[in-house]
Image (cartoon, grey):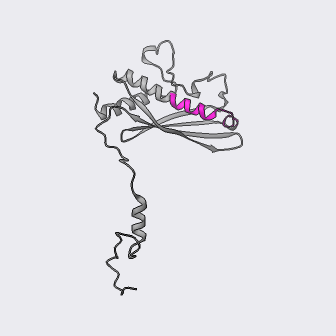
């Protein structure tokens, strides 16, 4: 059983190995590039225009969760194609799959990532030709039992706001009169 620090270091090393043009140490002599499953790996870099395909990913940690952020600059016409959201979800899934396999190579242990919720996809208009796509997916990291959950449950914000707005009024239970009020009661 790996400690939390070892898991985070293993994931960080797996991400560091994913730079553009990186080669697997085992196959570095025959020129086989490391495959992640991104758009930038498709086609020939010298002869293809690649349709403006420029993408990448990053990760960040929040307690026992791994957040994968994916960024893709593309032509605006690709955004309007049918199945565009499924393609972006597939690319984020490819990143998670790569992280699992690379983590196994780096540490020798398996990595369990459980998807939480839907992928958030935001498309930003840059010009009449280009757009920028940003996607974010949250995964729960398995085996991190000793990490406290940063969001332990639902907070009761409504009751706190009502109590604050009702200060000095008898309308809300638990509301108290501020100590600096010295006037007589109404």
Measuring from the top left, give residue 47's x and y in whole percent: 66, 22
Measuring from the top left, give residue 33's x and y in whole percent: 51, 19
Quarter that holds the C terminus: bottom left
Residue found at x 47% / y 13%: 29
Residue 34 appears in the figure: yes
Residue found at x 51% / y 22%: 35
Of residues 73 and 164, the one drawn nearer to the viewer in this rendering:
164
The answer to whether residue 159 is left or right of residue 123 is left
Residue found at x 60% / y 35%: 85
Q: Is residue 78 magenta?
A: yes
Find the residue positioned furthest to the top. 30
Mainly helix, strand or loop, the magenta region?
Answer: helix
Measuring from the top left, give residue 153's x and y in whole percent: 37, 49
Quarter that holds the N terminus: top left
Image quarter of residue 6: top left
Measuring from the top left, give residue 51's x and y in whole percent: 67, 30
Q: Write down the region rendered in magenta.
A: 77-93
State whether residue 121 is above or below residue 175.
above
Q: How many marks?
A: 0
Image quarter of residue 161: bottom left
Of residues 129 and 66, the one drawn nearer to the viewer in this rendering:
66
State whether residue 130 is above or below residue 15.
below
Of residues 82 and 55, the one drawn nearer to the viewer in this rendering:
82
Q: Is residue 184 magenta?
A: no
The answer to whether residue 109 is left or right of residue 71 is left
Of residues 167 and 174, the one drawn nearer to the viewer in this rendering:
174
Residue 136 appears in the figure: no
Find the residue positioned furthest to the bottom. 184
């Amino acid at each position: 059983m790996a400690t939390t620090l070892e898991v985070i270091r293993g994931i960080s090393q797996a991400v560091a190995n994913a730079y553009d043009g990186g080669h697997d140490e085992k196959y570095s002599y025959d020129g086989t590039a490391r495959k992640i499953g991104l758009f930038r790996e498709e086609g020939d870099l010298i002869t293809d225009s690649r349709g403006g395909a420029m993408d990448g990913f990053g990760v960040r940690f929040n307690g026992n969760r791994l957040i994968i952020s994916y960024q893709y600059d593309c032509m605006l016409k690709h955004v309007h194609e049918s199945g565009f959201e499924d393609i972006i979800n597939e690319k984020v899934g490819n990143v998670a799959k790569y992280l699992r396999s690379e983590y196994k190579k780096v540490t020798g242990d398996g990595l369990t990532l459980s998807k939480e919720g839907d992928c958030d996809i935001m498309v930003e208009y840059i010009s009449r030709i280009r757009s920028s796509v940003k996607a974010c997916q949250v995964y729960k990291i398995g085996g991190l039992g000793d990490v406290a959950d940063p969001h332990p449950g639902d907070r009761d914000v409504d009751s706190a706001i009502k109590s604050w707005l009702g200060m000095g009024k008898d309308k809300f239970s638990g509301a108290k009169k501020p100590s600096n009020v010295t006037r007589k009661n109404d």
